[in-house]
Amino acid sequence: MKVGIISLQGDVEEHREATYRAFDKLDVEGEVIEVKNVDELGSVNGVIIPGGESTSIGRLVSRSLFSALKERIGKGLPVLATCAGLIVLAKKVYDRRVGETKQPLLGVLDVLVERNAFGRQRESFETYIKVPLIGEKPFKAVFIRAPLIRKVWGDVKSIASIKEGIVAVKQNNVLATCFHPELAGDTRFHELLIKTIKV
Ligand code: GLN
């Protein structure tokens, strides 16, 4: 199995380590590669879009990779998208200051996202959340200038919330979080991606 990490900007290394740990846990033989172009994308069975800065990721992704990603995700390529990665997948994005953020979006996930939803007072924080889909044990969610999911439609399922709103969703092959599971020391989200690939 080959998992690709879109490696244009953001926390690629942490995702690589978490994915290898998840392979070990599940006893799956796998490889993780960096994906920067269409050829590399062509060779993977699943993809991770990391956190970072969604506007930078949107700017750095080539037009060809952008359309190839959109097409493959649309056809069922398993994806784990975290924080800025979630923003890039969303259909609609706004922030409180400028309203709709006219940034490039893949538009494959039926959600409305608010960027930087926690403001300055609470830029970064950790909290334990319940995510029944990955098991009973609460998951340590690390939020860094995080977005919030304000609305979902279509066949999107909310899989975790905090009091401010929805923080993780699943839509068929797409798993997306407002927080950073690669920083949790807990590989259950990466394991879920691997299990989705295996099916
Ligand atoms: N604030 C960033 C954005 O809007 C996301 C932050 C992150 O990925 N940790 O793109």
Image (spheres, rainbow, N blue to C red):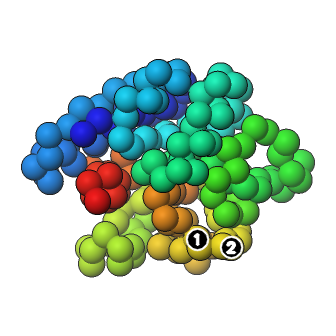
Query: Quick one: label 2, few (<14), some, or many (20+) residues within 10 Å?
Result: few
Q: Looking at the image, which residue sits at the far left?
A: 27
* Residue plotted at (46% across, 30% down): 41
Answer with left or right where residue 104 lies relative to residue 99. Answer: left
- Is ligand 1 less than 8 Å from the beta carbon at label 2? no
Residue at the location (79% across, 39% down)?
103
Q: Is residue 74 visible?
A: yes
Q: Which residue type does callout 2 highlight?
A: Trp
Q: Is residue 121 left or right of residue 199?
A: right
In this view of the protein, which residue sits in the foreground, 158 or 122?
158
Of all residues, the one furthest to the right in this rendering is: 98
Q: Residues within 10 Å of mark 1 (few under 14, many from 20)?
A: some
Q: Is residue 121 above or below residue 162?
A: above
Residue 97 visible at all: no
**Which residue is disc 1 drawn over?**
156
Report how far apart the C-alphas of labels 2 and 1 lie in the structure: 6 Å
Residue under circle 2? Answer: 153
Q: Is residue 161 above or below residue 189?
A: below
In this rendered view, identify the residue nearer to me: 66 or 191: 66
